[in-house]
Protein backbone atom coordinates (compact mmCIF):
# COMPACT_ATOMS: atom_id res chain seq x y z
CA UNK A 1 0.00 0.00 0.00
CA UNK A 2 1.15 3.52 -0.76
CA UNK A 3 -0.60 6.79 -0.09
CA UNK A 4 -1.98 8.71 -3.05
CA UNK A 5 -0.42 11.82 -1.54
CA UNK A 6 3.07 10.29 -1.87
CA UNK A 7 2.46 9.28 -5.47
CA UNK A 8 0.96 12.66 -6.36
CA UNK A 9 3.93 14.57 -5.01
CA UNK A 10 5.93 13.36 -8.00
CA UNK A 11 4.06 14.87 -10.93
CA UNK A 12 2.64 18.25 -11.90
CA UNK A 13 -0.97 18.67 -10.82
CA UNK A 14 -3.65 20.98 -12.24
CA UNK A 15 -6.32 20.38 -9.61
CA UNK A 16 -7.37 17.92 -6.93
CA UNK A 17 -11.00 16.89 -6.54
CA UNK A 18 -12.15 15.37 -3.25
CA UNK A 19 -9.83 14.63 -0.39
CA UNK A 20 -6.78 12.71 -1.55
CA UNK A 21 -5.00 12.91 1.82
CA UNK A 22 -6.10 9.60 3.30
CA UNK A 23 -6.46 7.55 0.13
CA UNK A 24 -4.34 4.41 0.16
CA UNK A 25 -3.46 2.73 -3.13
CA UNK A 26 -2.94 -1.01 -3.51
CA UNK A 27 -2.36 -1.24 -7.27
CA UNK A 28 -2.05 0.88 -10.42
CA UNK A 29 -4.12 0.30 -13.54
CA UNK A 30 -4.76 1.83 -16.94
CA UNK A 31 -7.43 -0.69 -17.91
CA UNK A 32 -10.87 -0.46 -16.28
CA UNK A 33 -11.33 -4.19 -16.86
CA UNK A 34 -8.36 -4.95 -14.62
CA UNK A 35 -9.21 -2.51 -11.82
CA UNK A 36 -9.56 -4.01 -8.34
CA UNK A 37 -10.61 -2.59 -4.99
CA UNK A 38 -7.99 0.01 -4.01
CA UNK A 39 -6.60 0.57 -7.54
CA UNK A 40 -5.50 3.95 -8.80
CA UNK A 41 -6.98 4.18 -12.29
CA UNK A 42 -5.27 6.28 -14.98
CA UNK A 43 -7.66 7.64 -17.63
CA UNK A 44 -5.36 7.34 -20.64
CA UNK A 45 -6.42 9.22 -23.76
CA UNK A 46 -5.53 6.42 -26.17
CA UNK A 47 -5.00 6.30 -29.89
CA UNK A 48 -8.15 4.23 -30.45
CA UNK A 49 -10.38 4.86 -27.43
CA UNK A 50 -10.33 7.30 -24.55
CA UNK A 51 -9.70 5.90 -21.07
CA UNK A 52 -11.76 8.77 -19.62
CA UNK A 53 -14.83 7.02 -21.04
CA UNK A 54 -14.10 4.12 -18.68
CA UNK A 55 -13.77 6.21 -15.52
CA UNK A 56 -17.17 5.20 -14.15
CA UNK A 57 -16.59 1.58 -14.97
CA UNK A 58 -13.26 1.74 -13.10
CA UNK A 59 -15.04 3.22 -10.06
CA UNK A 60 -17.67 0.45 -10.21
CA UNK A 61 -14.83 -2.09 -10.16
CA UNK A 62 -13.42 -0.56 -6.97
CA UNK A 63 -10.98 2.19 -8.01
CA UNK A 64 -9.97 4.20 -4.94
CA UNK A 65 -9.02 7.27 -6.99
CA UNK A 66 -8.43 8.38 -10.57
CA UNK A 67 -5.90 10.43 -12.52
CA UNK A 68 -7.32 12.30 -15.50
CA UNK A 69 -6.56 15.23 -17.77
CA UNK A 70 -10.04 16.80 -17.45
CA UNK A 71 -12.91 17.18 -15.03
CA UNK A 72 -15.02 14.09 -14.36
CA UNK A 73 -18.33 13.21 -12.70
CA UNK A 74 -17.22 10.45 -10.34
CA UNK A 75 -17.81 9.48 -6.71
CA UNK A 76 -14.12 9.01 -5.76
CA UNK A 77 -11.30 11.55 -5.37
CA UNK A 78 -9.36 12.33 -8.52
CA UNK A 79 -6.44 14.44 -9.67
CA UNK A 80 -6.33 16.40 -12.89
CA UNK A 81 -2.88 16.43 -14.51
CA UNK A 82 -1.51 17.87 -17.75
CA UNK A 83 -0.27 14.49 -19.05
CA UNK A 84 -1.78 11.25 -17.73
CA UNK A 85 0.74 8.89 -19.37
CA UNK A 86 3.71 10.78 -17.90
CA UNK A 87 2.08 10.98 -14.47
CA UNK A 88 1.41 7.24 -14.71
CA UNK A 89 5.04 6.52 -15.56
CA UNK A 90 6.31 8.45 -12.52
CA UNK A 91 3.68 6.82 -10.31
CA UNK A 92 4.76 3.38 -11.54
CA UNK A 93 8.43 4.13 -10.90
CA UNK A 94 7.58 5.27 -7.37
CA UNK A 95 5.17 2.39 -6.71
CA UNK A 96 7.97 -0.11 -7.38
CA UNK A 97 10.55 2.09 -5.62
CA UNK A 98 12.54 3.17 -8.67
CA UNK A 99 13.84 -0.25 -9.70
CA UNK A 100 15.80 1.08 -12.70
CA UNK A 101 18.05 2.92 -10.24
CA UNK A 102 19.23 -0.38 -8.85
CA UNK A 103 20.62 -1.65 -12.11
CA UNK A 104 22.82 -0.41 -14.88
CA UNK A 105 20.45 0.21 -17.78
CA UNK A 106 21.34 0.62 -21.44
CA UNK A 107 18.64 1.99 -23.78
CA UNK A 108 18.94 1.59 -27.54
CA UNK A 109 17.01 3.76 -29.99
CA UNK A 110 17.03 4.36 -33.76
CA UNK A 111 14.98 3.27 -36.75
CA UNK A 112 16.89 0.07 -37.52
CA UNK A 113 19.21 -2.16 -35.55
CA UNK A 114 17.74 -1.85 -32.04
CA UNK A 115 16.87 -5.53 -31.67
CA UNK A 116 20.23 -6.58 -33.15
CA UNK A 117 22.28 -4.25 -30.95
CA UNK A 118 20.39 -5.14 -27.75
CA UNK A 119 21.04 -8.84 -28.44
CA UNK A 120 24.75 -8.21 -28.98
CA UNK A 121 24.92 -6.23 -25.73
CA UNK A 122 23.04 -8.95 -23.85
CA UNK A 123 25.39 -11.61 -25.22
CA UNK A 124 28.51 -9.69 -24.20
CA UNK A 125 27.22 -8.79 -20.75
CA UNK A 126 26.47 -12.46 -20.13
CA UNK A 127 29.87 -13.54 -21.36
CA UNK A 128 31.37 -11.01 -18.96
CA UNK A 129 29.55 -12.74 -16.13
CA UNK A 130 26.49 -10.56 -15.51
CA UNK A 131 22.96 -11.62 -14.78
CA UNK A 132 21.08 -9.70 -17.46
CA UNK A 133 17.64 -8.49 -18.39
CA UNK A 134 16.51 -7.62 -21.91
CA UNK A 135 13.35 -5.92 -23.18
CA UNK A 136 12.51 -5.52 -26.86
CA UNK A 137 10.49 -6.26 -29.97
CA UNK A 138 10.63 -10.03 -29.76
CA UNK A 139 10.56 -10.73 -26.05
CA UNK A 140 11.50 -9.81 -22.54
CA UNK A 141 13.98 -12.18 -20.97
CA UNK A 142 15.72 -12.48 -17.66
CA UNK A 143 16.34 -15.12 -15.02
CA UNK A 144 16.00 -17.92 -17.60
CA UNK A 145 12.48 -16.81 -18.57
CA UNK A 146 11.41 -15.46 -21.93
CA UNK A 147 8.04 -13.86 -22.61
CA UNK A 148 6.74 -12.62 -25.97
CA UNK A 149 6.32 -8.86 -26.29
CA UNK A 150 3.24 -6.84 -27.23
CA UNK A 151 5.23 -3.66 -27.85
CA UNK A 152 8.91 -3.05 -28.53
CA UNK A 153 8.90 -0.81 -25.45
CA UNK A 154 6.18 -1.68 -22.94
CA UNK A 155 3.81 0.81 -21.32
CA UNK A 156 5.21 2.26 -18.08
CA UNK A 157 3.10 0.11 -15.73
CA UNK A 158 4.43 -3.04 -17.36
CA UNK A 159 7.94 -1.65 -17.70
CA UNK A 160 8.40 -0.67 -14.05
CA UNK A 161 6.94 -4.00 -12.92
CA UNK A 162 9.44 -5.76 -15.18
CA UNK A 163 12.34 -3.79 -13.69
CA UNK A 164 11.06 -4.67 -10.25
CA UNK A 165 10.85 -8.38 -11.10
CA UNK A 166 14.32 -8.21 -12.61
CA UNK A 167 15.70 -6.57 -9.49
CA UNK A 168 14.09 -9.25 -7.32
CA UNK A 169 15.82 -11.97 -9.32
CA UNK A 170 19.20 -10.27 -9.00
CA UNK A 171 19.50 -8.63 -12.42
CA UNK A 172 22.18 -5.95 -12.27
CA UNK A 173 22.56 -5.08 -15.95
CA UNK A 174 19.67 -4.57 -18.34
CA UNK A 175 19.36 -3.53 -21.95
CA UNK A 176 16.22 -2.40 -23.72
CA UNK A 177 14.92 -1.13 -27.03
CA UNK A 178 13.37 2.31 -26.76
CA UNK A 179 10.97 3.14 -29.57
CA UNK A 180 10.08 6.66 -30.60
CA UNK A 181 6.42 5.88 -29.82
CA UNK A 182 7.47 5.05 -26.28
CA UNK A 183 9.50 8.23 -25.88
CA UNK A 184 6.73 10.47 -27.19
CA UNK A 185 4.07 8.85 -25.06
CA UNK A 186 6.22 8.84 -21.94
CA UNK A 187 6.46 5.06 -21.48
CA UNK A 188 10.07 5.42 -20.24
CA UNK A 189 9.47 8.56 -18.16
CA UNK A 190 10.82 7.92 -14.66
CA UNK A 191 13.28 5.32 -15.90
CA UNK A 192 16.92 5.94 -15.18
CA UNK A 193 19.18 5.11 -18.11
CA UNK A 194 22.93 4.95 -17.65
CA UNK A 195 23.82 4.57 -21.31
CA UNK A 196 21.78 5.56 -24.36
CA UNK A 197 22.65 4.27 -27.84
CA UNK A 198 21.56 5.75 -31.16
CA UNK A 199 21.75 3.53 -34.24
CA UNK A 200 20.36 5.58 -37.14
CA UNK A 201 17.31 7.34 -38.51
CA UNK A 202 15.57 6.70 -41.79
CA UNK A 203 12.03 6.89 -43.01
CA UNK A 204 9.43 5.05 -40.96
CA UNK A 205 6.48 5.92 -38.75
CA UNK A 206 5.63 9.14 -40.59
CA UNK A 207 2.02 8.29 -39.78
CA UNK A 208 2.91 9.01 -36.15
CA UNK A 209 5.59 11.70 -36.39
CA UNK A 210 4.93 14.77 -38.54
CA UNK A 211 8.33 14.91 -40.20
CA UNK A 212 11.78 13.32 -40.06
CA UNK A 213 12.94 16.19 -37.85
CA UNK A 214 10.02 15.57 -35.52
CA UNK A 215 10.90 11.85 -35.51
CA UNK A 216 14.54 12.69 -34.69
CA UNK A 217 13.46 14.99 -31.83
CA UNK A 218 11.39 12.12 -30.46
CA UNK A 219 14.46 9.84 -30.45
CA UNK A 220 16.51 12.58 -28.80
CA UNK A 221 14.26 12.45 -25.71
CA UNK A 222 16.20 9.35 -24.66
CA UNK A 223 19.43 11.35 -24.64
CA UNK A 224 17.87 14.23 -22.72
CA UNK A 225 16.68 11.65 -20.18
CA UNK A 226 20.28 10.64 -19.44
CA UNK A 227 20.51 13.80 -17.38
CA UNK A 228 17.73 12.80 -15.02
CA UNK A 229 20.15 10.70 -13.01
CA UNK A 230 18.80 10.45 -9.46
CA UNK A 231 22.17 9.46 -8.09
CA UNK A 232 25.33 11.47 -8.23
CA UNK A 233 28.57 10.10 -9.58
CA UNK A 234 26.90 7.61 -11.87
CA UNK A 235 28.72 6.92 -15.08
CA UNK A 236 26.54 7.94 -18.02
CA UNK A 237 27.28 7.91 -21.73
CA UNK A 238 25.56 8.82 -24.98
CA UNK A 239 26.70 6.43 -27.71
CA UNK A 240 25.94 7.97 -31.09
CA UNK A 241 26.44 6.95 -34.72
CA UNK A 242 28.75 9.65 -36.07
CA UNK A 243 27.82 8.95 -39.69
CA UNK A 244 24.09 9.49 -39.42
CA UNK A 245 22.63 12.76 -40.65
CA UNK A 246 20.43 13.26 -37.56
CA UNK A 247 23.14 12.50 -34.99
CA UNK A 248 23.62 16.15 -34.16
CA UNK A 249 20.09 16.23 -32.74
CA UNK A 250 20.98 13.43 -30.31
CA UNK A 251 24.27 15.14 -29.44
CA UNK A 252 22.55 18.46 -28.80
CA UNK A 253 19.97 16.83 -26.55
CA UNK A 254 22.42 14.68 -24.68
CA UNK A 255 22.93 15.35 -21.02
CA UNK A 256 25.83 12.87 -20.83
CA UNK A 257 29.33 12.61 -22.33
CA UNK A 258 29.12 11.62 -25.99
CA UNK A 259 30.95 8.67 -27.59
CA UNK A 260 30.83 8.75 -31.39
CA UNK A 261 31.17 5.49 -33.32
CA UNK A 262 31.17 4.83 -37.06
CA UNK A 263 33.31 4.49 -40.14
CA UNK A 264 34.20 8.13 -40.73
CA UNK A 265 36.91 10.31 -39.24
CA UNK A 266 34.33 11.96 -36.97
CA UNK A 267 34.05 8.78 -34.95
CA UNK A 268 36.50 8.14 -32.11
CA UNK A 269 35.36 4.48 -31.97
CA UNK A 270 35.91 3.44 -35.56
CA UNK A 271 36.11 0.58 -38.02
CA UNK A 272 38.96 1.06 -40.50
CA UNK A 273 40.08 -1.02 -43.49
CA UNK A 274 36.68 -2.63 -43.78
CA UNK A 275 36.66 -5.75 -45.91
CA UNK A 276 33.16 -7.04 -46.67
CA UNK A 277 33.05 -10.67 -47.76
CA UNK A 278 30.18 -13.08 -48.44
CA UNK A 279 30.84 -14.95 -45.21
CA UNK A 280 31.16 -11.82 -43.01
CA UNK A 281 33.56 -8.93 -42.60
CA UNK A 282 36.86 -7.98 -41.15
CA UNK A 283 37.99 -4.55 -39.99
CA UNK A 284 40.45 -2.79 -37.73
CA UNK A 285 38.72 -1.73 -34.55
CA UNK A 286 40.16 1.63 -33.59
CA UNK A 287 39.64 3.67 -30.44
CA UNK A 288 42.04 6.06 -28.67
CA UNK A 289 45.07 3.91 -27.87
CA UNK A 290 43.52 0.75 -29.35
CA UNK A 291 43.77 -0.94 -32.74
CA UNK A 292 42.74 -4.56 -33.25
CA UNK A 293 41.64 -6.72 -36.19
CA UNK A 294 38.09 -8.06 -35.83
CA UNK A 295 36.46 -10.78 -37.93
CA UNK A 296 32.71 -11.13 -37.80
CA UNK A 297 30.41 -13.63 -39.46
CA UNK A 298 27.61 -11.05 -39.34
CA UNK A 299 26.65 -9.83 -42.80
CA UNK A 300 27.17 -6.43 -44.43
CA UNK A 301 28.20 -2.94 -43.49
CA UNK A 302 25.10 -2.40 -41.36
CA UNK A 303 26.24 -5.21 -39.06
CA UNK A 304 29.60 -3.52 -38.60
CA UNK A 305 27.72 -0.45 -37.35
CA UNK A 306 25.72 -2.65 -34.98
CA UNK A 307 28.87 -4.31 -33.64
CA UNK A 308 30.52 -0.90 -33.10
CA UNK A 309 27.39 0.39 -31.34
CA UNK A 310 27.28 -2.59 -28.99
CA UNK A 311 31.03 -2.37 -28.25
CA UNK A 312 30.81 1.38 -27.59
CA UNK A 313 27.80 0.83 -25.30
CA UNK A 314 29.80 -1.54 -23.13
CA UNK A 315 32.70 0.88 -23.07
CA UNK A 316 30.28 3.65 -22.08
CA UNK A 317 29.03 1.39 -19.31
CA UNK A 318 32.54 1.19 -17.88
CA UNK A 319 34.03 -1.99 -19.38
CA UNK A 320 37.60 -1.94 -20.66
CA UNK A 321 38.49 -2.58 -24.29
CA UNK A 322 40.57 -5.59 -23.20
CA UNK A 323 37.35 -7.23 -22.01
CA UNK A 324 35.12 -6.10 -24.88
CA UNK A 325 37.24 -6.71 -27.98
CA UNK A 326 37.77 -10.47 -27.61
CA UNK A 327 33.97 -10.90 -27.62
CA UNK A 328 33.20 -9.10 -30.88
CA UNK A 329 34.18 -11.86 -33.29
CA UNK A 330 31.84 -14.29 -31.50
CA UNK A 331 28.67 -12.19 -31.75
CA UNK A 332 25.80 -14.29 -33.06
CA UNK A 333 23.07 -13.22 -35.49
CA UNK A 334 19.51 -12.72 -34.28
CA UNK A 335 16.43 -14.73 -35.28
CA UNK A 336 14.73 -13.24 -38.34
CA UNK A 337 17.60 -10.85 -39.08
CA UNK A 338 19.40 -11.97 -42.23
CA UNK A 339 18.53 -15.51 -41.21
CA UNK A 340 19.37 -18.21 -43.76
CA UNK A 341 16.79 -20.98 -44.19
CA UNK A 342 18.80 -24.17 -44.02
CA UNK A 343 18.17 -26.86 -46.63
CA UNK A 344 19.98 -29.28 -48.95
CA UNK A 345 18.80 -27.36 -51.99
CA UNK A 346 21.29 -25.04 -53.78
CA UNK A 347 18.92 -22.03 -53.56
CA UNK A 348 19.74 -19.56 -50.79
CA UNK A 349 16.71 -18.26 -48.91
CA UNK A 350 17.15 -15.40 -46.45
CA UNK A 351 14.42 -14.23 -44.06
CA UNK A 352 14.87 -10.67 -42.87
CA UNK A 353 12.84 -8.22 -40.80
CA UNK A 354 13.55 -5.30 -43.17
CA UNK A 355 10.36 -3.25 -43.12
CA UNK A 356 11.74 0.18 -43.96
CA UNK A 357 13.26 1.46 -47.23
CA UNK A 358 16.68 1.85 -45.62
CA UNK A 359 16.82 -1.61 -44.05
CA UNK A 360 15.66 -3.18 -47.32
CA UNK A 361 18.37 -1.28 -49.17
CA UNK A 362 21.03 -2.41 -46.69
CA UNK A 363 20.01 -6.02 -46.81
CA UNK A 364 19.70 -6.11 -50.59
CA UNK A 365 23.03 -4.34 -51.03
CA UNK A 366 24.60 -6.99 -48.81
CA UNK A 367 22.93 -9.79 -50.76
CA UNK A 368 24.11 -8.25 -54.05
CA UNK A 369 27.64 -8.72 -52.79
CA UNK A 370 26.98 -12.40 -52.13
CA UNK A 371 24.57 -13.57 -54.83
CA UNK A 372 26.17 -15.62 -57.57
CA UNK A 373 23.18 -15.06 -59.86
CA UNK A 374 19.66 -13.67 -59.47
CA UNK A 375 17.98 -12.10 -56.46
CA UNK A 376 14.25 -12.65 -56.03
CA UNK A 377 12.56 -10.55 -53.38
CA UNK A 378 9.25 -11.28 -51.68
CA UNK A 379 8.04 -8.19 -49.86
CA UNK A 380 4.91 -6.50 -48.51
CA UNK A 381 4.16 -3.61 -46.16
CA UNK A 382 2.23 -3.53 -42.91
CA UNK A 383 -1.27 -2.09 -42.77
CA UNK A 384 -2.15 0.87 -40.51
CA UNK A 385 1.45 2.01 -40.58
CA UNK A 386 3.37 4.71 -42.49
CA UNK A 387 1.96 4.71 -46.04
CA UNK A 388 4.70 6.90 -47.44
CA UNK A 389 7.29 4.14 -47.04
CA UNK A 390 5.38 1.70 -49.27
CA UNK A 391 6.46 2.94 -52.74
CA UNK A 392 9.98 3.54 -51.40
CA UNK A 393 10.28 -0.05 -50.21
CA UNK A 394 9.07 -1.29 -53.59
CA UNK A 395 11.64 0.95 -55.29
CA UNK A 396 14.48 -0.52 -53.23
CA UNK A 397 13.26 -4.06 -53.90
CA UNK A 398 13.13 -3.38 -57.63
CA UNK A 399 16.56 -1.73 -57.71
CA UNK A 400 18.39 -4.85 -56.57
CA UNK A 401 16.17 -7.75 -57.68
CA UNK A 402 15.78 -9.67 -60.92
CA UNK A 403 12.14 -10.10 -60.05
CA UNK A 404 9.98 -8.86 -57.17
CA UNK A 405 6.93 -10.53 -55.64
CA UNK A 406 4.72 -7.89 -54.08
CA UNK A 407 2.68 -9.58 -51.40
CA UNK A 408 0.85 -9.09 -48.13
CA UNK A 409 2.61 -8.44 -44.78
CA UNK A 410 0.37 -7.73 -41.77
CA UNK A 411 -2.56 -5.99 -43.47
CA UNK A 412 -4.26 -5.28 -40.11
CA UNK A 413 -7.39 -3.22 -40.83
CA UNK A 414 -6.45 -2.34 -44.43
CA UNK A 415 -7.17 -4.27 -47.63
CA UNK A 416 -4.01 -6.08 -48.79
CA UNK A 417 -4.80 -5.01 -52.37
CA UNK A 418 -4.77 -1.33 -51.37
CA UNK A 419 -1.40 -1.67 -49.64
CA UNK A 420 0.05 -3.42 -52.70
CA UNK A 421 -1.38 -0.65 -54.93
CA UNK A 422 0.55 1.88 -52.84
CA UNK A 423 3.71 -0.20 -53.27
CA UNK A 424 3.19 -0.50 -57.02
CA UNK A 425 3.49 3.29 -57.32
CA UNK A 426 7.19 2.83 -56.58
CA UNK A 427 7.75 0.24 -59.32
CA UNK A 428 9.11 1.75 -62.50
CA UNK A 429 8.18 -1.10 -64.79
CA UNK A 430 10.80 -3.71 -64.04
CA UNK A 431 9.78 -7.30 -63.68
CA UNK A 432 7.39 -7.98 -60.80
CA UNK A 433 4.34 -10.03 -59.93
CA UNK A 434 1.58 -9.33 -57.46
CA UNK A 435 0.78 -12.41 -55.39
CA UNK A 436 -1.36 -11.30 -52.49
CA UNK A 437 -1.24 -14.64 -50.68
CA UNK A 438 2.15 -14.57 -48.88
CA UNK A 439 2.54 -18.34 -48.84
CA UNK A 440 1.93 -18.54 -52.60
CA UNK A 441 4.36 -15.67 -53.19
CA UNK A 442 7.10 -17.49 -51.26
CA UNK A 443 6.42 -20.75 -53.12
CA UNK A 444 6.51 -18.98 -56.51
CA UNK A 445 9.75 -17.17 -55.72
CA UNK A 446 11.47 -20.37 -54.58
CA UNK A 447 10.16 -22.24 -57.61
CA UNK A 448 11.49 -19.54 -59.93
CA UNK A 449 14.97 -19.69 -58.39
CA UNK A 450 17.73 -21.77 -59.97
CA UNK A 451 20.85 -23.11 -58.26
CA UNK A 452 22.93 -20.19 -56.92
CA UNK A 453 20.04 -17.72 -56.80
CA UNK A 454 19.02 -15.92 -53.61
CA UNK A 455 15.43 -15.45 -52.44
CA UNK A 456 14.93 -12.68 -49.90
CA UNK A 457 11.73 -12.85 -47.86
CA UNK A 458 11.50 -9.44 -46.25
CA UNK A 459 9.37 -7.70 -43.65
CA UNK A 460 8.31 -10.24 -41.05
CA UNK A 461 11.57 -11.75 -39.78
CA UNK A 462 10.91 -13.50 -36.47
CA UNK A 463 7.13 -12.99 -36.56
CA UNK A 464 5.14 -16.19 -36.26
CA UNK A 465 1.80 -14.72 -37.26
CA UNK A 466 0.06 -12.69 -39.90
CA UNK A 467 -2.21 -9.99 -38.51
CA UNK A 468 -5.35 -9.79 -40.63
CA UNK A 469 -8.09 -7.54 -39.31
CA UNK A 470 -7.66 -7.66 -35.56
CA UNK A 471 -6.74 -11.35 -35.56
CA UNK A 472 -3.36 -13.04 -35.66
CA UNK A 473 -3.13 -16.21 -37.77
CA UNK A 474 -0.17 -18.59 -37.56
CA UNK A 475 2.37 -17.68 -40.22
CA UNK A 476 6.10 -18.17 -40.23
CA UNK A 477 8.19 -17.12 -43.25
CA UNK A 478 10.94 -19.55 -42.23
CA UNK A 479 8.64 -22.58 -42.04
CA UNK A 480 6.87 -21.68 -45.28
CA UNK A 481 10.26 -21.28 -47.00
CA UNK A 482 11.38 -24.69 -45.70
CA UNK A 483 8.22 -26.24 -47.17
CA UNK A 484 8.79 -24.47 -50.48
CA UNK A 485 12.42 -25.62 -50.60
CA UNK A 486 11.31 -29.23 -50.10
CA UNK A 487 9.29 -28.96 -53.32
CA UNK A 488 12.11 -27.29 -55.26
CA UNK A 489 13.54 -29.24 -58.20
C1 LIG B 1 -0.57 3.52 -31.34
C2 LIG B 1 -0.06 3.00 -30.05
O1 LIG B 1 1.07 3.21 -29.72
N1 LIG B 1 -0.89 2.28 -29.32
C3 LIG B 1 -0.48 1.77 -28.03
C4 LIG B 1 -1.42 2.32 -26.98
O2 LIG B 1 -2.71 1.90 -27.28
P1 LIG B 1 -3.87 2.95 -27.31
O3 LIG B 1 -3.39 4.28 -26.82
O4 LIG B 1 -4.45 2.89 -28.68
O5 LIG B 1 -4.90 2.33 -26.29
P2 LIG B 1 -6.46 2.33 -26.48
O6 LIG B 1 -6.90 1.00 -26.94
O7 LIG B 1 -6.89 3.53 -27.25
O8 LIG B 1 -6.95 2.48 -24.97
C5 LIG B 1 -6.83 3.72 -24.25
C6 LIG B 1 -6.99 3.42 -22.80
O9 LIG B 1 -8.33 2.97 -22.53
C7 LIG B 1 -8.26 1.85 -21.69
N2 LIG B 1 -9.48 1.04 -21.77
C8 LIG B 1 -9.89 0.52 -22.95
C9 LIG B 1 -11.02 -0.29 -23.00
C10 LIG B 1 -11.73 -0.57 -21.78
O10 LIG B 1 -12.74 -1.28 -21.73
N3 LIG B 1 -11.27 -0.01 -20.64
C11 LIG B 1 -10.17 0.78 -20.60
O11 LIG B 1 -9.79 1.24 -19.53
C12 LIG B 1 -7.01 1.12 -22.17
O12 LIG B 1 -6.55 0.19 -21.23
C13 LIG B 1 -6.06 2.29 -22.36
O13 LIG B 1 -5.45 2.65 -21.17
O14 LIG B 1 -1.08 1.82 -25.70
C14 LIG B 1 -1.09 0.39 -25.62
C15 LIG B 1 -0.71 0.02 -24.19
O15 LIG B 1 0.54 0.48 -23.92
C16 LIG B 1 -0.09 -0.18 -26.61
O16 LIG B 1 -0.07 -1.59 -26.52
C17 LIG B 1 -0.50 0.26 -28.00
O17 LIG B 1 0.43 -0.24 -28.92
C18 LIG B 1 -0.11 -0.86 -30.09
C19 LIG B 1 -0.30 -2.36 -29.85
C20 LIG B 1 0.83 -0.65 -31.26
O18 LIG B 1 0.73 -1.33 -32.26
N4 LIG B 1 1.75 0.28 -31.15
C21 LIG B 1 2.82 0.50 -32.12
C22 LIG B 1 2.50 1.64 -33.09
C23 LIG B 1 4.03 0.87 -31.31
O19 LIG B 1 3.95 1.45 -30.22
N5 LIG B 1 5.20 0.48 -31.82
C24 LIG B 1 6.44 0.73 -31.15
C25 LIG B 1 7.60 0.22 -32.00
C26 LIG B 1 7.73 0.95 -33.28
C27 LIG B 1 9.09 0.72 -33.92
O20 LIG B 1 10.08 1.31 -33.45
O21 LIG B 1 9.17 -0.03 -34.89
C28 LIG B 1 6.51 -0.04 -29.84
O22 LIG B 1 7.22 0.39 -28.92
O23 LIG B 1 5.91 -1.12 -29.78
N1 LIG C 1 22.28 -0.71 -38.34
C1 LIG C 1 21.39 -0.98 -39.27
N2 LIG C 1 21.16 -0.12 -40.28
C2 LIG C 1 20.24 -0.35 -41.22
N3 LIG C 1 19.51 -1.47 -41.29
C3 LIG C 1 19.69 -2.38 -40.31
C4 LIG C 1 20.63 -2.18 -39.26
N4 LIG C 1 20.59 -3.24 -38.45
C5 LIG C 1 19.64 -4.06 -38.93
N5 LIG C 1 19.12 -3.56 -40.08
C6 LIG C 1 18.03 -4.08 -40.91
O1 LIG C 1 16.82 -3.73 -40.23
C7 LIG C 1 16.06 -4.89 -39.89
C8 LIG C 1 15.53 -4.74 -38.49
O2 LIG C 1 16.62 -4.84 -37.59
P1 LIG C 1 16.34 -4.83 -36.04
O3 LIG C 1 15.24 -5.74 -35.76
O4 LIG C 1 17.63 -5.01 -35.34
O5 LIG C 1 15.84 -3.31 -35.91
P2 LIG C 1 14.84 -2.63 -34.90
O6 LIG C 1 15.34 -1.23 -34.79
O7 LIG C 1 14.77 -3.40 -33.65
O8 LIG C 1 13.44 -2.67 -35.65
P3 LIG C 1 11.96 -2.49 -34.95
O9 LIG C 1 11.83 -1.04 -34.62
O10 LIG C 1 10.99 -2.85 -35.97
O11 LIG C 1 11.92 -3.38 -33.77
C9 LIG C 1 17.01 -6.05 -40.02
O12 LIG C 1 16.31 -7.20 -40.40
C10 LIG C 1 17.97 -5.57 -41.10
O13 LIG C 1 17.35 -5.75 -42.36
N1 LIG D 1 7.75 -2.40 -35.06
C1 LIG D 1 7.29 -2.29 -36.42
C2 LIG D 1 7.14 -3.65 -36.94
C3 LIG D 1 6.78 -3.73 -38.40
C4 LIG D 1 6.76 -5.13 -38.89
C5 LIG D 1 6.05 -5.32 -40.19
N2 LIG D 1 5.93 -6.72 -40.40
C6 LIG D 1 4.68 -4.65 -40.16
O1 LIG D 1 3.76 -5.29 -39.70
O2 LIG D 1 4.57 -3.51 -40.61
C7 LIG D 1 6.01 -1.48 -36.46
O3 LIG D 1 5.16 -1.68 -35.59
O4 LIG D 1 5.88 -0.66 -37.35
MG1 LIG E 1 13.20 -4.06 -32.58
Image: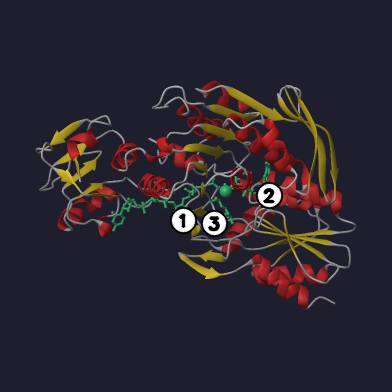
Q: Which residue is at the far front?
A: 129
Q: Is residue 482 left or right of residue 183?
A: right
Q: Is residue 319 left or right of residue 81?
A: right
Ligand 3 closer than 8 Å to label 3 CB:
yes
Ligand 1 closer than 8 Å to label 1 CB:
yes
For residue 393, the mark is 2
Residue 487 vertical position relative to residue 335 in the rendered view, above or below? below
Q: Where is residue 7 in the image (x, y as percent from the top left)?
A: 24, 37
User: Does the image show residue 23?
Assistant: yes
- Residue count near mark 1 (Cα–Cα under 10 Å), binned few <14, some 14–19, many ≥20: few
Q: How far apart are marks 3 and 2 (CA)?
A: 14 Å
Task: Say whether disc 3 or disc 2 marks the residue closer to the N-terminus.
Answer: 3
Q: Distance between the residues labelled 3 and 1?
A: 17 Å
Which residue bears the numbered disc 3? 383
Q: How far apart are marks 2 and 1 (CA)?
A: 25 Å
| Residue at the image point whose x is 62% and y is 67% from the top | 476
Residue 482 vertical position relative to residue 68 in the rendered view, above or below? below
Amino acid sequence: MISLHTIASLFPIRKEYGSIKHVEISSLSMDSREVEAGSLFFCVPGYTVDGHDYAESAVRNGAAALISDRSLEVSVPYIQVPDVRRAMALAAARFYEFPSMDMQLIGVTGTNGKTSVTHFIEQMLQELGSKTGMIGTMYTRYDGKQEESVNTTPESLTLQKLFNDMRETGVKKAVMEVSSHALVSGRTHGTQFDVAVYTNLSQDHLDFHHSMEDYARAKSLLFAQLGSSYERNKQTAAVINADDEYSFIMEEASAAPVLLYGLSEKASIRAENLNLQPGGSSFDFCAPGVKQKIHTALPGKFSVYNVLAAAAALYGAGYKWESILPLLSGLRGVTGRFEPVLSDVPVHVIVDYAHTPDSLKNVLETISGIAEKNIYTVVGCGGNRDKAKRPLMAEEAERYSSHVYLTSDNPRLEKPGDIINDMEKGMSGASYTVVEDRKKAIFEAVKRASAGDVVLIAGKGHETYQEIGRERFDFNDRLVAEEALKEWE
